[in-house]
Amino acid sequence: MRQRKPLVVANWKMNGDQCLAHQVSDSLAALSGSLPDILICPPVIFLPNFPKHPHYSLGAQNLSEQAAGAFTGEISAVMLAQAGASHVIVGHSERRTLFGETNQQVTKKVEQALDAGLKPILCIGETASQRSEEKTFQVLAEQLDAVYSAQPQWLEASVVAYEPLWAIGTGNTATPEQAQQVHAFIRQHLTQYSADAAAALRILYGGSVNAGNSEALFAQADVDGALIGGASLNAAEFAAICLSAKGE
Ligand SMILES: O=C[C@H](O)COP(=O)(O)O
């Protein structure tokens, strides 16, 4: 039996509509058998289009680093929780690269999420050039330490997602062996903060996961699920990925 229950997360990014919300909720509700934990992170305006169902939970893709105030266009952690989110993705590479989010901002967002009772899904990953320069572990360690070195207790309520930038939206999935090597490094690195929390931590892989490659990725000892972009926009394919993760 697996040590950690798998978690499969749909990150719709800025895609989808009410119709897709109904398709995805219907297809997940129809699943039976041993299921992983399943989390849907649509654009937040679609959260109310998902009826409550025991087969899935809801999350958000981003949050404000501030608690409240004159921050036009921002959404706070408390608001996300009130809208039904249990988790929030923090520090996705698109936030870091396209919107200039720094490790410092990511840390503040993790704090906001936890203060509001949301579980942060902290995204980390290296670029293709960092990998070819053999800096992968160094980059990941910096991204992890920026968040957890001052507040190691945050690890207990966190999920970490390893998303190599070269694999996101490219079809160039990390091999199961590459993913396992990095996930094992992440878990080992985090034992310095809490051996128990590191052992219990769910580490997700993200980057061109689809129904054809998910089972081999999930078979790796330290791959505890996935963060799925493009393939989560197809209700049938996302359901197939969830089934390949198996809950027990
Ligand atoms: O959050 C999801 C990741 O960025 C992966 O996206 P992708 O599955 O489209 O490669």
Image (cartoon, rainbow, N blue to C red):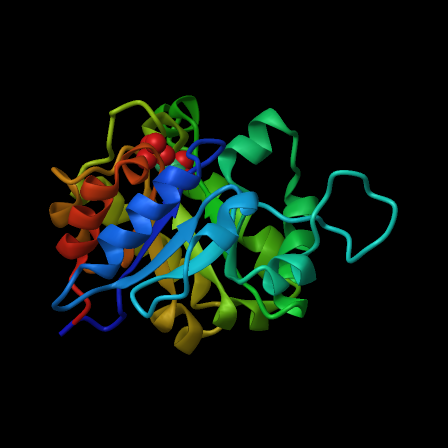
Q: How many marks?
A: 0
Taking the spot 35% from the left edge, 63% from the top edge, the residue there is 202
Vertically, is 242 above or below 105?
A: below
Q: Is residue 67 visible?
A: yes
Most extreme residue toward the bottom is 196
Position of residue 203 measured from the top left corner of the image (x, y, whole percent) = 35, 57
Taking the spot 27% from the left edge, 59% from the top edge, the residue there is 224
Position of residue 233 measured from the top left corner of the image (x, y, whole percent) = 32, 36
In which of the image's four quarters is ligand 1 placed?
top left
Q: Quadrant of the N terminus?
A: bottom left
Query: Can you tell which quarter of the image residue 72 is in?
Result: top right
Q: Is residue 177 left or right of residue 39?
A: left
Query: Can you tell which quarter of the image residue 19 is in?
Result: top left
Vertically, is 99 above or below 50?
A: above
Taking the spot 66% from the left edge, 53% from the top edge, the residue there is 109
Q: Quadrant of the C terminus?
A: bottom left
Query: Can you tell which quarter of the image residue 149 is in?
Result: bottom right
Q: Is residue 219 visible?
A: no
- Which residue is at the front of the view, 186 or 3? 3
Most extreme residue toward the right is 70
- Which residue is at the front of the view, 37 or 46? 46
Position of residue 185 measured from the top left corner of the image (x, y, whole percent) = 34, 53
Q: Is residue 129 left or right of residue 104?
A: left
Q: Is residue 196 left or right of residue 37?
A: right
Position of residue 157 measured from the top left corner of the image (x, y, whole percent) = 50, 70
Taking the spot 17% from the left edge, 60% from the top edge, the residue there is 31
- Which residue is at the front of the view, 128 or 158? 158
